[in-house]
Amino acid sequence: MKSNIFIGWDIGGANTKFCVFNQHFNIIDVKCKNINIWNDFDNIKSIFNEVSTKYKNYNISNFITITAESCDNFDNRISAMQSILKNCNLHIAGKKVFYTNSDKYLYYDDAVANPAKLFSTNWMLTAKFINNLTNINLAIDIGSTTTDLVYKNMNLEDNINDHKRLINNTLFYAGVVRTPIAMLVDKLEFMSKEVSVVNEVFSTTGDVFNLTNDIDFSDLEYVGSDKLDYTAENSYKRLARSIGLDYKEDMKQEIIKISCSIKEIFIDIIFEKINFLLGNNLEKITLTSIGEGGFLIKDLSEKYNLNYLSIESENIILNNNIDKNILYKHFTAALVVKNFFEDKNIIL
């Protein structure tokens, strides 16, 4: 008799994450695959097939949240969601349910008939998780592309889609890998002189956090804006290009200073968002972080003297072989499973 296995999926435009629970609800695997859906949508099939093949000897149940529908290779979000759903249905083995913005899970036929209910729902899983905690008021999820600010008792209807969240400052469209430097800063100081940043995608935040040693790219699949790897040398070259220079060895320390300055600007922008949302109660809140850019929130808390509590203090059942740091970078892939069994929204 086959054992049961439960797989959570968070399908994003730049990254697809999955988290696997065994029948005892221990997490036995968690990974992220850098798949740029806007470049080649067919690539999504490879990760679906890879995971389905790996666990083919189990009874598989899949729980899926989707944020990739805004990629511009699709005509619109409706057609995007329907294409993503179709590929999930064809290439993910086992039973499948899809998470909606009404905190319910739909089977495939109902999901295809109601695609707008599935738009960018992963942050709602974080919101529900935070609402069930007593010691954390705000979670900030910083990924490769976006930053979600999710606070306790946040009104879901007022933030039901990306447009409303952008208006409300609960979504900041910047992340720690893919965001062009020119989208964060207009000018930088280099060799004691102020220089305008070139408005081209010559470098990204990945170069910044590569040189500040906040992200180790050695085991990651990302490539930079010039399609080259995230080596230190390549990041120096890309950042130099953003201020109109060709990189030379004697620029190294100045470019590291630039990277540190951009990091501080990123932190300050996030704090402005926090202050806008919760400014009257900052001394009373405790915040936490998830996602690839969680390190920024730790540094932000120290800079602005805010109470910070690591999400790792929360009780998520783990196998001892799972790295908690990796899990909390891809936490929503675990939450989409955890939320289902806590609420028992439908019976598989």
Image (cartoon, rainbow, N blue to C red):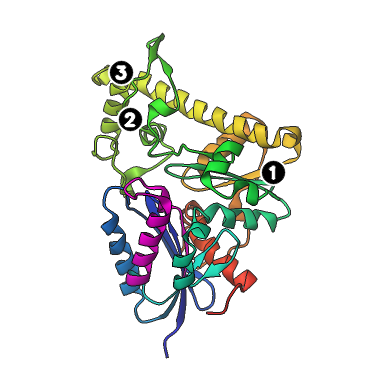
* Label 1–label 2 contact, CB within 8 A: no
Mark 2 vs mark 3: in front = 2
Front position in the image: 4 or 217: 4
Residue 251, disc: 3
Q: Is residue 193 above or below residue 86?
A: above
The span from disc 2 to disc 3 (Cα, nearest Å) is 16 Å
* Sooner in the amino-acid sequence: mark 1 or mark 2: 2
Mark 1 vs mark 2: in front = 2
* Sooner in the amino-acid sequence: mark 2 or mark 3: 2
Q: Which residues are magenta?
A: 62-90
* Label 2–label 3 contact, CB within 8 A: no
Residue on which disc 2 sits? 203
Front position in the image: 6 or 307: 6
Q: Is residue 70 magenta?
A: yes
Residue placed farthest to the top in the image?
Answer: 193
Looking at numbered disc 1 in the image, what kind of residue is underneath it?
Answer: Thr
Looking at numbered disc 3 in the image, what kind of residue is underneath it?
Answer: Met
